Amino acid sequence: MRLTAYTDYTLRTLMYLGAHRDRLVTIQDIADLHSISKNHLMKVVHQLGLSGIVETVRGRNGGLRLARDPAEINIGTVVRETENDFFMAECFNTDNNTCPLTPDCQLKAKLGQATGAFLAVLDSVTLASILAPVQNAPALAAGVIPLHLKK
C-alpha cells in the first residue's frame, strides 16, 4: 500500500501541529522543515480546515493549530479522507478494468483483505499515539518524528 504525497503531507502537517501545540505554526514552518512546496501545503491545510481538524488564524501574527485534541484525531479517518481511492490493482476499478483474469481471479479478494487490514490498523491509531514522547522534543523540532503504532 502506498499513500499519495497529499496524504503524506497531511500526516506530516498534523504531526507537526501536534508537536507544537504551544504556539501558532505557519505553513512556511512546515514547508521549510520538510522541503515541501508551500503551495502543496496550502491545499492540505485548506482541506484540514474544512474538515474541522485544523484551525487557521488569519492576520500578521496568524498561523495554524489543531482544532481538536490529538487523541480525537483518528489516523484511519484522515487517510480515508485524503486518499482518492484504494485500488490495489486494476481490477478494483470497475470502470477501467481490462484484466481478462478478473472472472476467475482470487487475488482481488486477498488484496481487498490486505487493504482492509491496513486500514484497520490505522483505525486503531490516533494522532496522540504517534506523537513522540516529550523527551524527544529536540528530535521533533529537527523534523525527526518516530512513529509508534498501537497494537
Image (cartoon, rainbow, N blue to C red):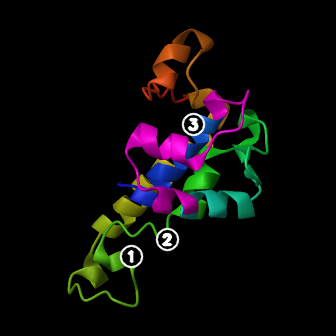
Q: Is residue 68 above or below residue 48?
A: above
Percent across and percent down for residue 89 are: 30, 70
Q: Which quadrant does the N terminus fall into?
A: bottom left
The three-letter code of the residue at mark 2 reads Asn
Q: Is residue 87 left or right of residue 100?
A: right
Of callouts 3 and 2, which one flags the residue occurring earlier in the amino acid sequence? 3
Q: Amino acid at mark 1?
A: Phe
Give me the C-alpha separation between circle 3 and circle 1. 31 Å
Magenta-span inclusion, residue 30 = yes
Q: Which residues are magenta?
A: 18-42
Mark 3: secondary structure: helix
| Residue 68: mark | none
Sequence-first tag of 3 and 1: 3
Identify the residue shown where x is 57% and y is 49%.
27
The residue positioned 42% from the left and 26% from the top of the image is: 144
The residue wearing badge 3 is 15
Query: Which amino acid does the dot numbered 3 rest on?
Result: Met
Residue 120 vs residue 143: left or right?
right
